[in-house]
Each structure stands twice: as C-alpha cells, then as structure tokens.
Image: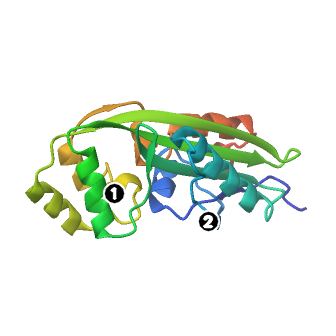
Amino acid sequence: MTDTTPKLVLASASPRRQELLAQISIFPDKIEPADIDETPHSGERPRLYVKRMAVEKAQSVARRYPRDIVLAADTVVALGRRILGKPENRHQAEKYLRLLSGRRHQVLTAIALVSPEKGRMSSRVQVSTVRFQHLGDDAIARYLETMEWQGKAGGYAIQGQAARYIDFISGSYSSIVGLPLAQCARLLEGAGYNSASRD
C-alpha cells in the first residue's frame, strides 16, 4: 500500500533552521534549497522584501514537490528602510557592524508554507528588535576574525560570539536566529502536518 501522507520539504540549506525545527521535534523529510534571485527591488521595504523572498522560495520548491508540504524562510536585518543582507566580504561585514554599533535595528524573518491542497500558500512575518552595545575598533576586529559573519544577515549571528555585544532584544529569539518556531508550528498544524505520527 502506497503511503500518501505528504512529506515535509524544507526549502533551506541552513543548518540553523534544521536545528531549530529539531528543537520542537520537527524533522524535514527532505532538504531542498531554493535557487532564486534574491536581489531587492528598487525601493522595496524590508517587510515586503523578506516576505517575497520566503514566498518565492516556497513556490520554487513546491513546483518540484506538488504532493508535499514545503516550508521556506528568509531573514533580513533592517535599519529603518535599509536592508542589510548577507555581506559579500569582510569589508562589507565591517561596514554593517559599524552601522549597527550602539543602535537598535530590526530582524525580520518571513516563513512561507505551501500545502498540497490546491497549492495553498500561507505566510507570516515576525519582526524583532535587537540593540548592539557600542562596538569599538578592537571589538569589531575580533568579531570579524571569528568569520561568523559569513552567510549571516546583517553580518552577525546572535547565537554565536556576537551575543556578548547584544544588550537588548524584543520579539522572538528563534526568529532572530532564523525561524519563528511558534508560528512555524501553527502553520504546519494548519496544513495537517503531525510530527508525532512520524516516529
């Protein structure tokens, strides 16, 4: 007898997102990163951008897995309307850290889920606030040496050594890391995904 239960496909190669899902006993059946153009549109605001990215990632992968549940996410750091994505090099990472030094900024994570029921799409955006202490030249140089900035929105990872410089957060910690777990769990339950039955 063929198993017709939809599988869960995570449209992200991020090990952090896999670790976060495992924290709430959700283990994707397949990891399938989306390959899309992540260039912001001219004048695009952070909230609209991050939601568009998550939706496009989910749609891209869902076309390959029409019978399964596809979960995608995207995270950006924003200073006002300015989007700070993943730095392309050390120089850009340093520029981001100097911009964030001593200031509050927002971390926006969007999640998008496509369920096999007529390709139904659901999405949410979680906005959190983070404040860095003032970062002197030595602190910035030390952090850049860790290489943690590579592949991280805004040039830092809150779950790593950057934590020593962060004195305030408001919102969802897991969302700042890369996935708002409470919202993910609700969307998956709404799509009929039951992690307890997958043991």
Front in this rendered view, residue 10 or 169 = 169
- Residue position marked by numbered label 1 in the rendering: 155
Q: Is residue 92 visible to the viewer in this orientation of the structure? A: yes
Judged from this view, the residue extending furthest toward the front is 42
Q: Which mark is residue 33?
A: 2
Nearest to viewer (mark 2 / mark 1): 1
Image vertical order of residue 32 relative to residue 44, above or below: below
Q: Is residue 148 visible to the viewer in this orientation of the structure? A: no
Pick whichever of labels 2 and 1 is earlier in the sequence. 2
The image shows residue 83 at horizontal and vertical percentages of 45, 48
Q: Amino acid at mark 1?
A: Gly
Q: Amino acid at mark 2?
A: Pro
Image vertical order of residue 84 relative to residue 133, above or below: below
Front in this rendered view, residue 182 or 164 = 164
Front in this rendered view, residue 21 or 66 = 66
Image coloring type: rainbow
User: How many numbered callouts?
Assistant: 2
Front in this rendered view, residue 85 or 28 = 85
Residue 67 lies left or right of residue 112; in this view the side is right
